[in-house]
């Protein structure tokens, strides 16, 4: 049975000490020698050297903002604003030496073209003090491995030669895959790299639910849905290849509406993702659904993605109250009928509706307490369907989900790990101060969080204080 997660508050600590001094032994024990950084990796020569410069007694100074950069965190954690005002900051990756590379999308109003921004903290105070930029188009996904940086634009995946320790590429980029679909509702591409040299790419659906007329009241669904051949799934390509097109790839998983939050579990090598579920059940089908259904249906579904069977979109969605997949109204459903949905993949976990998952990370570091080891962090952009929401907001947070083996721990509930990104202004999302997008792990086990509304990057550490 899928555990349905409810919005929950918590007693979060606001306003940790601005400067936390750890002695060398305590810092070593907290940071460890992490060699599996998820999106990040190992070693932080520049940052570590810089930090040591500030502690003549052999200690290491770890800097955090007094208000954690305006967010709240569990007791024992604190954050610094690593960088601010970058632009439309989407996914990010960290190299073994601790340099941070951020994918910038084009600005929301189209006035600024995106690029890649490279950030370095030379003195170890938790704030980037060196910045470089490159590229001539925006994008969403980014990953670094083997002295190469991969950058996912909307229609192509580029590969830069970028040795660790460099902030700028040493050669012009090569096109790994080009000509990808980049029209319709979902154009952002997320990328992950497997240990076997596969480049895995999310290609989101062009529509909400594959209607004959997208998002039109009572427009029926197309049968069969033509998008499923080229959209709404995961494709794999040769990460070392050049000038590939979509037909050169392997259609790995079908029926996933938009998997912007995508990650490989380093402990198992398996691919996971959290789907952005469909919208407008009440808006488009008012005879079948109530206004409150618009806020509460469907679930944002977490899957172990092995490609063994279709995952259901557009024919099915997950109802968190029935705890099962039901037939979509575009295909004859009424909110209760299951029909063909009995044969599609059920979620391994169900998050609340419309929270908009955009980033996922399996934590492999030693800095955070044991309860966080091998579990998954998910960044939620926040719902657009509750503009006047107060209290526990519909998303606009980073949550933690414990894993046991290769699946979410049985009976586990999520923890809201980082919160208060949106601020107090309304309506949401337009008036939000910040909206979390993606996550990356640094070489010492620190957690980086990106934000595409304020262009901010947070660096979260654990001190135990």
Image (cartoon, rainbow, N blue to C red):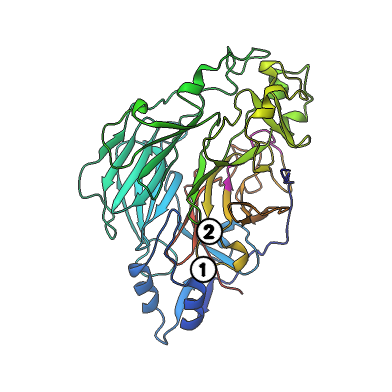
Disc 1 packing (10 Å; few <14; some 14–19; many ≥20) = many
Residue at 59% across, 27% down: 313
Q: Report the front residue among 269 and 51.
A: 269
Instruction: Return the mark for residue 310.
Output: none
Position of residue 153 measured from the top left corner of the image (x, y, whole percent): 37, 35
- In magenta segment, residue 387: yes
Circle 1 SS class: loop
| Image-based side of 52 in relation to 445, left or right | left
* SS for dot 2: loop
Residue 135 location in percent, x, y?
29, 41
Which range of residues does the magenta coloring cover? 379-388
Locate residue 113: give its quadrant.
top left
Is the residue 254 above or below the residue 41 in the image? Answer: above
Residue on which the image places disc 1: 366
- Residue under circle 2? 363
**Is residue 126 or residue 190 the one in the foreground?**
190
Q: Please name the predominant secondary structure of the magenta segment in the image.
A: loop
- Quarter location, residue 156: top left
- The reply to whether the C-beta atoms of the residues labelled 1 and 2 are less than 8 Å apart is no
Q: Is residue 417 a member of the stretch shown in magenta?
A: no
Relative to 329, 202 lies left or right: left
């Amino acid at each position: 049975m899928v555990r349905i997660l409810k919005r929950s508050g918590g007693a979060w600590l606001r306003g940790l000490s601005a400067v936390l001094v750890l002695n060398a032994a305590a810092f070593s024990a907290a940071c460890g020698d992490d060699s599996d950084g998820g999106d990040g990796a190992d070693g932080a020569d520049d940052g570590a050297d810089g930090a040591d410069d500030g502690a003549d007694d052999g200690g290491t100074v770890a800097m955090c903002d007094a208000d954690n950069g305006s967010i709240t965190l569990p007791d024992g954690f604190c954050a610094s604003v690593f960088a601010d005002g970058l632009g439309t900051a989407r996914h990010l990756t960290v190299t073994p030496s601790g340099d941070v590379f951020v994918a910038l999308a084009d600005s929301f109003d189209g006035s600024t073209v995106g690029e890649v921004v490279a950030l370095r903290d030379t003195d170890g105070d938790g704030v980037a003090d060196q910045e470089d930029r490159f590229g001539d188009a925006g994008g969403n996904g980014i990953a670094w491995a083997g002295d190469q940086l991969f950058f996912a634009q909307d229609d192509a995946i580029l590969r830069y030669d970028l040795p660790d320790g460099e902030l700028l590429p040493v050669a012009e980029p090569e096109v790994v895959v080009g000509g990808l679909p980049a029209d319709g509702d979902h154009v952002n591409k997320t990328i992950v790299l497997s240990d076997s040299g596969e480049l895995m790419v999310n290609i989101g659906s062009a529509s909400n639910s594959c209607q004959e007329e997208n998002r039109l009241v009572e427009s029926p669904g197309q049968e069969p849905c033509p998008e499923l051949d080229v959209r709404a799934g995961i494709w794999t390509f040769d990460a070392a290849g050049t000038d590939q097109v979509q037909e050169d790839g392997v259609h790995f998983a079908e029926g996933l509406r938009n998997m912007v939050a995508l990650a490989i579990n380093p402990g198992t090598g398996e691919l996971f993702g959290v789907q952005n579920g469909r919208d407008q059940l009440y808006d488009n089908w008012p005879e079948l659904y109530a206004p409150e259904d618009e806020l509460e249906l469907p679930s944002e579904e977490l899957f172990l993605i092995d490609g063994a069977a279709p995952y259901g979109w557009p024919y099915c969605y997950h109802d968190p109250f029935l705890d099962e997949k039901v037939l979509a109204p575009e295909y004859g459903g009424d909110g209760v009928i299951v029909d063909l949905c009995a044969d599609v993949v059920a979620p391994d976990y169900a998050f609340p509706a419309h929270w908009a998952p955009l980033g996922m990370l399996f934590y492999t570091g030693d800095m955070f307490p044991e309860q966080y080891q091998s579990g998954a962090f998910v960044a939620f952009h926040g719902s657009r369907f509750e503009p006047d929401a107060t209290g526990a907001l519909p998303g606009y947070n980073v949550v933690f989900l414990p894993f046991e083996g290769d699946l979410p721990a049985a009976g586990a509930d999520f923890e809201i790990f980082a919160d208060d990104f949106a601020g107090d202004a309304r309506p949401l999302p337009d008036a939000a101060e910040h909206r979390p997008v993606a996550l990356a792990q640094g070489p010492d086990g620190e957690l980086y969080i990106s934000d595409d509304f304020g262009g901010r990057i947070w660096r979260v550490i654990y001190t135990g204080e």
